[in-house]
Image (tube, grey):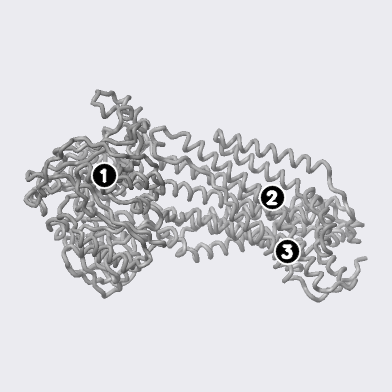
Amino acid sequence: MSLGSWRAVLRIARRDALRAKGRSALIVAMIAIPVLGMSAADVTWRSVQLDTDETISRSMGTADAWVQDVGGGIGGSAMPGGIRQTPDATEYRPAGMDTSGRPPASRSAVAMPEPDPATTEPPRDPGASIPGVTERLTDRHSFAAVSTAHGRTSAQIREFDYAEPLAKGMVFQRKGRAPATADEVVVTEALRKTAGYRVGGQLVELSTGRTFRIVGTVDLPNSLNDQTVIARPGSMLDTMRGLPGTARIPPTEDRMLVRVPGGVSWSEVLEANKQGVVVKSAHVLAHPPAASQVPRFDSPQQWIDSRELRLAGIGLGLGLLEMVLLAGPAFAVGARRKRRELGLIGVAGGSRRHIGGVVLAGGVVLGAVGAIVGTGLGLIAAAALRGWFAERSGKILGRYDAHAVELLGIGAVGVAVGVAAALIPAWLAAREDIAASLTGRRGVRGSSRVLPTVGTAVTALGVAVAMFGSGAPNDEVILAGVVLAELGLVACCPALIGATAKLGRFLPLSPRLALRDAARSRTRSAPAVAAVMAAVAGSVVIAVLWQSETQDNRNRYRAGGPANHVLIGFPGRTPSYGSPFEEPPLTQAQAQEARRTVEDLLPATKGSTLGVPKGACTPDGSCVDFRPEKLPEFLCPMETGRPMTDDERMHLIGDPRCSSGHGGYFMSVVGDAEALRRLTGANDPRAADVLSRGGIVLFEPGYVAPDGTVAVRALEGGRPEYPPGMAGGPEHAVSQPAVPEPVHRVPAVEIRAPFPPGVMFLSSEAARTIGARVEPAGLVYDAGEPPSDAKVQALEDRMAKISGQSFVFVERGFQGKDDARMLLLAVFALVVTVGASGVATGLALADSQKDLATLGSVGAPPGVRRRLSAFQSGVIAFLGTVLGLGAGLLAGVVVRRGQRSSVWDAMPDVAKRDLHAPETVIPWAQMGVALVVLPLLAALLAALLTRSRAMVRGRTA
């Protein structure tokens, strides 16, 4: 057609859209809903992805770099060979560590020895590793106990003058102001909420007893959930570090912001790495080095990033397919409603090309309007949901980042989808008989016998292709297979509707009429079913991926005990690793006081006392330690003393004989069967039996001999129970006779406990048999339900008065955090599913108004018409939901299978140790809800929107 013809058909399409406002609004909504979701997702995603300047501002303010000494600050012996780091400083490892096949060590995973105040050299100045530093600002972190409105809690203590220009952007002030004096602090909003603080109130640092005034609240933009107290430099940590005994604080993590004219180059970062200093440089972040200059890291984050890129590509392809399927029924119904107008164009001399052009122009006009409306609403939605996403993800979003080019592209996709969806209706309208169009007679057409056969074959082919692609893995093949499967299901829709209509003979009048009408008007019903299918399929894919990711995180979670159990321990008195043993033994009176305290604060709990076996100590500080002996065949080859090569050691990493599964807070525990159950979650009758006979329960294989006993060796000269110079040292040592026998055989049993506390669990009689005395070391309780933060803080406060080194641990179970990206996709899928289902069924219902008018003219009461409308919409929504569940399940399963093939199967075996393979979780509950709720919702809306009064329509001649 000529340009003038296109102007004419566009004017006709515009006038027709204005004349049929209701139908046009539904079509616009069908296009606008996906565009809304895509534009809101684009803006939110861009806001989540911080720009380089935002990343720099949040991590180092206006400084040129931050530096941290991780290699020599503790006597210069932690990493004497220097380190290797990534350009963004998120990971580093010792320079000599082999990178071939070994999992990388993150910053939190690098083992750092405990400092000894007597031998530790003063910390080095990390800023000295960078030449040309003109300005510095320290940022020190540690932990300490602080008072709360309910008792006490542990909080991060941070000495940082964030009001300095060098730190601008690292901390967001919510209320009040920054600390100005040494007795002022600010707290994060997360800590304020849990601790019950208020601006102007007081906070006590409990190790020193110093009182600080709270002058404001802040947010840490990348860590909204952190519970942190921020004070001025030198006002808290140095005073706390100088305290003796139990009041000593953990080692501080010290960073330094530095100003360097000209910035810090990558070569200067590498030079600092040789001195054991990690550097995060603004210049390097803005100008990343070439890959050849970066140390090789086999990082799980790289696998995660590549997986997300693959998911984004597959999601984009499925999203475009969903948009086409959603818009298709809109234009199909619109073309059917305009048959008479199109026939008049033919009578007036218009060619078939002009008739098709009018329908196609409607796609352009309504597609453009839908794109504009959807984009505008998407921008508003992205702005309105910023706070909600920040709260759910624990991070403040970056600046509102709307990329005009991307939004124009999304709008263009909306227009293109409108045109593509109008192509087939335009082609059919151009082939329509003009006389039939003017009379409005449709007739009844039989369904094609070939189409369902072809659709079934295409569906089967798509499933096979998708499964093959997920095993390869190949994202393009996966996407092609899923698209083929969905198109095959679309082709099967008319036949499926016809088969469903045969069930009408067994139903009452209204559902029978609804089924038969759906089968008679398959050109109206099938596109609507396909639209609902596409919307539901998208939601199911998101649900599968979300729940599977959550399950992966749950598998990685390591619980400290049974759900809702409360453990109170006194680590200064128990033989746990790293304990200073600075307090004298807990007395029975103190243990009873602790029990009364717990039962007073948590009246519904039932608890048990835990003890530890203590050996004899001599005045020189040498104590007896008790360890079970492994059977010879279960000894790790590395324990035999035989020289081994590095390759032999590597092969033993996954050997169960060389892995230690014990953890928790105690190496050995003394208690009864109830204490064992409460502490470990084990309810094994064999364990209860052996404890009643004065035996021992072991949590690892290889200790119990065939005769049902275990050898427990008393090791002389172990770690001193009370080191010299500390409270409770040799001058307080308990004088006991030497152990008469170095080895004792005790009845024993091996069990698999869900939460093993250590190596062995002894009965009191077994402790006496091996020559140990039992000292109270803790309490364990069944809480029934997790106590509130206020209860825990009160409990910590009461326990601290009994023992300065007490701790309270509550196992609340896995607490999944919502990822902003998955939340974004889930909200988008929900909006599209509900909106598309309603609009698709609404379009089909609008096309059936003549049938409803006919019912009214023959005397059908309003109830029949309402029920007919409800069942028509319900049938369409139900069939679409069933097909969508199947299509979405296929897509979700193959995508997860592809993730496993590309991530898990590609990982070296060493990296898989102690990890769970990715699982595919089918959201059966959500699928069941969708199968029931969506059809009911569609039926309810249709019934409510159907007019009670019959509309009298003139006869079309």
- Label for residue 842? 3
Camera-side residue of 637 and 267: 637
Q: Position of residue 464 (x, y in %)?
A: 65, 36
- Above or below residue 472? Residue 673 is below
First along the sequence among labels 2 and 1: 1
- Above or below residue 214? Residue 107 is above
First along the sequence among labels 1 and 3: 1
Q: Residues within 10 Å of mark 1 (few under 14, many from 20)?
A: many
Camera-side residue of 481 and 338: 481
Name the mark nearer the viewer: 2 or 3.
2
Reading the image, the residue beneath label 1 is 766
Q: Secondary structure at mark 1?
A: helix
Q: Are marks 1 and 3 in contact (CB under 8 Å)?
A: no
Q: Secondary structure at mark 2?
A: helix
- Above or below residue 939? Residue 914 is above
- Left/right placement of residue 883 relative to residue 94 reads right
Q: Residue at x 68, y 41 (%)?
A: 484
Q: Give the CA separation, mark 1 to mark 3.
A: 76 Å
- Above or below residue 377? Residue 264 is above
Amino acid tagged 2: Leu
Is residue 173 at all visible to an observer of this figure? no
Give the quadrant of the C terminus: bottom right
Name the mark nearer the viewer: 2 or 1.
1
Reading the image, the residue beneath label 2 is 883
Is residue 724 at all visible to an observer of this figure? yes
Q: Position of residue 894 (x, y in %)?
A: 58, 41
Q: Secondary structure at mark 3?
A: helix
